[in-house]
Image (tube, grey):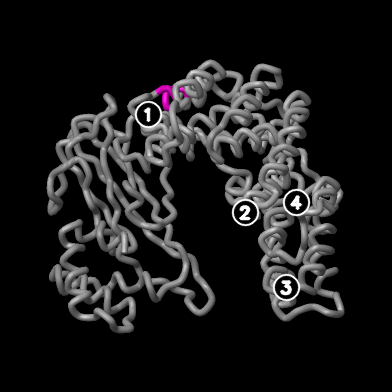
Amino acid sequence: VRMYQTLLGTEGFRKGMDLYFSRHDGQAVECDDFRAAMADANKRDLRQFGRWYSQAGTPRVKAVTRYDAQTKTLKLTLTQSCAPTPGQPDKLPLHIPVAVGLVGRDGRDMPLHLAGVPAGMTAMLELTKARQTFTFTQVGEKPVMSLLRNFSAPVILDVEYTDAELAHLLAHDSDHFNRWEAGQRLMMRRLLALTAAAEKGEPLSLDQMVIDALRATLNDVSLDPAFRELALTLPSETVMAEQLEEVDPEAVHAARRFMRASLAQALKGDFLAAYEACMTTGAYQPDAVSSGKRSLKNLALSYLLEWPDESTARLAQAQFDTADNMTDRAAALTTLVHAGSAVAALAAAKALRQFYREFEKEALVIDKWFTMQATAPSADVAAVRALMRHPAFTLSNPNRARSLIFSFCNGNPARFHAADGSGYAFWAQQVLALDARNPQVAARLARSLDRWRKFTPALRKKMKQALQQVANAKKLSKDVREVVGKSLAA
């Protein structure tokens, strides 16, 4: 639906919706009926757009730019492809809307001049062939191209930005989605480089350019606090692992923890200022502005507790004690539990007991209580087993099982993928235990190892053994047998 609005504009999409409801209100319809209404209302041929429904897989779009200073032209070449999938070895080109802008050296959007496209600061290109080149004229200086503005299409974008270009987009792009995406790309590059260094046992370091770019974003008060919180949130270990051909969870964890600690050290004063600036007074307000301030404040608090001293632990403890809303209270508790320092650990143990006493009758809150402990960097299999002996835990409750066991297996990769294989032995035991109670829940947990071939050889061997242990069980549901069988055969 979003792509239709992107292609047709707000007014054109409204016309299409009006026609769609006049034709089909109260009827059972197909995607093609919706597409036909959009096409007819706007007198557009959208038959190629139908391939989004009939072809499987996520397309990749590769972008290459070439600037000519003499002719003041910028050529953008887009190439689309989609990997073969079962039953569809060859894919036809899709109709892909690609919104683009040009960001100048001064950080401002440059006017776009492209034949057949209305003048403006953002141009909507329609990629319909396997390869197309678009030529922009009257481009007075070499810009940084902002691609897929407002996430104009759900594609994987391949583009070779330099670090300086990513930092420029992070600092200046008027499109907030691309601004965030630039920051994520820049941080991901550093995280992957740190991961490679950790695998080799080399010293880890974070360059000043990344620190300065994130400092500028954190301190830019013209940006919404909610955006700054998202921009300063590092890619998760799970997302990092997706970028690697072979995953070493310990190295991934070490890289991310090092980058967080480095940013906390370099930006301590900035995070403290952001924390204080986002303190809200008066009664709790659920509006977007207040919510954004809470988000940034709690992110700043999590970075501040990377400093293992009493002052930062007291800050989190004070927020836990005085918070008048669950967002701030749970965030302070999670920060204490995840901090890892001895000072924070003492405060966390006390706060966990207090939190449980206050909310033991609130099932959803206690689910969160289990999750924050299961995902803590210090939580190993022994800690999870201890939590399973807690009076509030039961395997018979799917939500409670998810809050602890699933959270550990899927949300704590460094500990779950322990080198001794204890996480996999625990996984096998819990899959079998759950299968006797709820095969559907057990099958979901069984998928925690469905990408086992991506990991290092030593971990692969232990994962395969755990999968085979489950597969060889005498009493195994059809649900779990299918998941495990496909994982082993993949």
Q: x, y (%) of residue 13?
A: 21, 63
Tell which tag, 2 or 3, sits nearer the viewer: 2
Callout in the foreground (2, 4): 2
For marks 3 and 1, the one nearer the N-term is 1
Residue 21 is situated, as x and y percent measured from the top left of the image, at 22, 75
Q: Quadrant of residue 260?
A: top right
Q: Position of residue 312 (x, y in %)?
A: 64, 21
CA gap, disc 2 and disc 4: 37 Å
Q: Residues within 10 Å of mark 1 (few under 14, many from 20)?
A: some
Residue that appears at 27% across and 74% down: 34
Give the residue pinned by disc 4. Answer: 456
**Image position of 22 with respect to 301: above or below:** below
User: What's drawn in magenta, residue-wise?
Assistant: 215-219
- Determine which residue is flagged by label 1: 171
Which residue was labeled with disc 2?
A: 364
Mark 2 touching mark 4, by CB under 8 A?
no
Q: Which part of the image, by quadrant, shows the C terminus?
A: bottom right
Magenta stretch: dominant SS?
helix
Report how far apart the C-alphas of labels 4 and 1 lie in the structure: 37 Å
